[in-house]
């Protein structure tokens, strides 16, 4: 999961600081999410899915299909 959120952020050409601002967390906290040092809270997973226009299942590695469910 952690590599996916990093890859998706990089696909948008956003820095960790920019992504953290979108999520309302500090850059340090976001960095820890990407490294797997912190579990990503549900509300942050939902925000990430919306930002990346994907599903939480994709972020969690439960599916390899990045398209969200309709």
Image: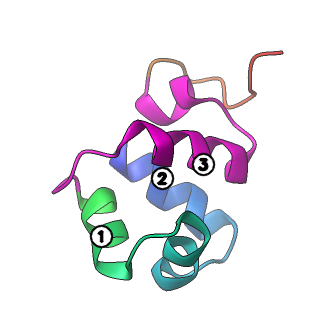
Which secondary structure lies at badge 1?
A: helix
Question: Vertically, is 8 above or below 12?
Answer: above
Quadrant of residue 65 within the rendered picture: top right
Which x, y percent locates residue 20?
A: 49, 73
| Residue range (magenta) | 36-61
Drawn side of residue 55 relative to residue 20, left or right: right
Q: Secondary structure at mark 2?
A: helix
Residue 11 x, y percent position in the rendering: 66, 64
Q: Which residue is mark 1?
A: 29
- Residue 29, relative to residue 61: is it above or below? below
Between the C-alphas of marks 2 and 1, the distance is: 14 Å
What residue does disc 2 label? Answer: 5
Q: Residues within 10 Å of mark 2 (few under 14, many from 20)?
A: many
Question: In the rendered view, does 44 fall on the left or right side of 40?
Answer: right
Q: Which residue is pictured at 48% across the width and 42% down the height?
A: 43
Nearest the viewer among 2 and 20 is 20
Residue shown at the point (24%, 65%) measured from the top left: 32
Q: Is residue 56 highlighted in magenta?
A: yes
Whether label 3 touches label 2, CB < 8 Å: no
- First in sequence: mark 3 or mark 2? 2
Q: Residues within 10 Å of mark 3 (few under 14, many from 20)?
A: some
Q: How far is disc 3 from disc 2 in space, using C-alphas?
A: 12 Å
The CA span between labels 1 and 3 is: 15 Å
């Amino acid at each position: 999961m952690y590599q996916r959120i990093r890859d998706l952020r990089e696909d948008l050409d956003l820095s960790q600081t920019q992504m953290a601002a979108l999520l309302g967390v500090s850059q340090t906290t976001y960095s820890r999410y990407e490294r797997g040092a912190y579990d990503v809270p549900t509300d942050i997973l939902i925000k990430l899915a919306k930002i990346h226009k994907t599903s939480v299942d994709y972020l969690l590695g439960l599916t390899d299909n990045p398209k969200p469910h309709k």
